Image (cartoon, helix red, strand yellow):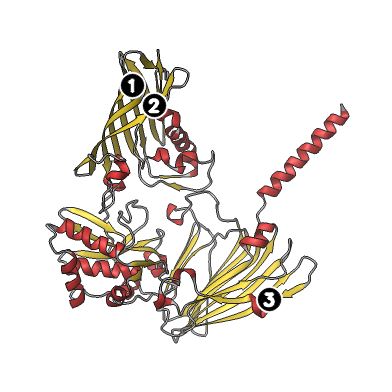
Amino acid sequence: MTNIINKLTLLLCLLALTASVFAASEAEYKKLSKAYTLNADGSQEFRYSMELTLFTHTAMNGTYGESFIVYNPEYQVLKINSSYTKQKDGNIIKTPDNAFVEVLPHAAADAPAYNNLKEMVVVHTGLELGATIYLDYTLTSKPGYLPELDIYDELLQSSPVKEYTISLSAPESKPLFYTLQNNSTKPAVSTANGMKTVTWNLRNLPASSRDPFVSAANGDVPFLTASTYASNGDALKALYTQFTPASDVQLTAIAENITEGKKNDTEKVQAILKHVNENLGYSRLSLPDAGYKIRSSSDVIYSAYGTEAEKANLLNGLLNAAGIKAEAAAIYRVKADPASCGLNAVSGLVVVANADGKQYVMSPASNKMAVWNGITPVISLTNAGTPVAVNTPSGDIDYKVTLSVSPEKADAQVSATIGNAYLPYYGSYLSTFAGGDKEATEAKTQNGTTISYKVSQNLETNNGYVMVSLPDAPVSLAHSYYCQMNSSRKDNLLLPCKANEHYTYTVQLPEGMKLSTPEAVKTIENAAGKVVISVKQNGNTAEVERSLQLNNQLYTPAQFTNLRSLLTEWGNTSNRTLLLSIN
């Protein structure tokens, strides 16, 4: 008996040890420091240093084996102050010269105009478990290259940080606005030699979450924004002054060519958006990496590619040149004090226009609506600093389906009303929703489109039973990862939309077939919303109803359990099939 108890104790200890190992982080930043300085002559310095101790082979061989620094050698000077590895026994391995490798940044690979950019890859050598990587470098920008001190920084790293120091320095004569959100640390402010310095000393920051769909836009991720622009409007104005005016002769000629023969403003908008999206390549180079500069519309047209900002400039110019009133706007990453938000706090640029009574919020890289969650601000570049009112499109889905069943097949007649939130601005989407039905029709409604189509499925008899799949929307939450999430969550969750889905099925059963799926009405209703799954038989007709209604789009960890119970039920595939028996 004692032997058994000892073995059980040993087993429990091993399990506890295993759990602690898996719970531990791959690495830990002993120290991390970022210092941003704007000098009186307009030059800037960014100094970065880290001490990172490795705990796992993954950290050593993959996650932290290299460091990457993107810069523009024409306007910036990179100086490696120190780079070495301190092994567990104290042995120092200096990074050799051939471990500093300059490459072209991946985002600039298909953008010849930006092939002057460099990415310094620092290959860390002498790595082993327990080793600590030391890296310290300074990136100095020439006066005028970066217009102002402009910072957006999410504080949590991929591994925990014991000590994290962030400092901002600018001339006393310059405004310096900053916001540290979702962290209570107060800054130390000092003044010396005409410079104002703001410093945060953060302690024991956890690793960033590995939960899916985590974003600073959700409102709970710690971040810092800082800017020496006089206002966020001035920051946007600095970008917008680089935009090509609609009066440009070349833009006018191209707009006339693209919109020739178009019957109304809607067709003009669709044609111009399609041209910018499909006839011009898209470079994913970020605005900061481009030095907050954009090329002219003429250069973009002749090179046949552009960054997001460059394509937004062209899209905005073409629409206005075609007589459609449009304005360029910035979508921000987070909600913060507007004064502290420079261009680095912008997550994307869009163009907003109205055509035939409908608002279009267009991305220069997509045929779908660019933003519609209403969580983070959308601010106009055209009218610098003015909020843009974005109409939230309908996220409703409503299906009415009639199924005629035989032992060999099931024929469905579907009337599907899809909210505008799911529909592209141009291009056919019938194939997405109606499959291979070439006779499918669509009818526009104020809030969406109603698609009528037919679809058939072959049935296979198995021991006297057949399974019939119930048609539903391919964009339904039932087909998403949201219905397969873990049972707990530590971070806010922002859904694509405030879901409202409803499906009714009328299934005509022939003589000799009957419903074998149990008749039942299952309702789950809680603070997150409501799910109803109903299966009934009335003579030779089976009636099925499925509905999902969510009360919110953003859910906190405290609300997640209720939400998950709804989505887990909604994603259950058995709710989208019927079991029929053949006599």
Where's the N terminus, which quadrant?
top right
Q: Quadrant of residue 84?
A: bottom right
Give the residue displayed 34% in from the left and 33% down from the top.
471
Residue topped by disc 1: 406
Residue topped by disc 2: 459
Task: Depth check: give the residue in front, 61 or 154.
Answer: 61
Do the CB atoms of the residues marked 3 and 1 lie less than 8 Å apart? no
From what the image shows, is residue 86 above or below residue 217?
A: below
Residue at the right extreme, as displayed: 2
Specify which label sits upstream in the sequence, 2 or 1.
Answer: 1
Q: Position of residue 163 (x, y in %)?
A: 63, 64
Give me the disc on residue 95.
3
Q: Quadrant of residue 382?
A: bottom left
From what the image shows, is residue 356 above or below residue 327?
A: above
Which of the two marks, 2 or 3, is nearer to us in this view? Answer: 2
Which three-letter amino acid code belongs to the residue tagged 3? Answer: Thr
- With 197 as the anchor, is 322 left or right in this view? left
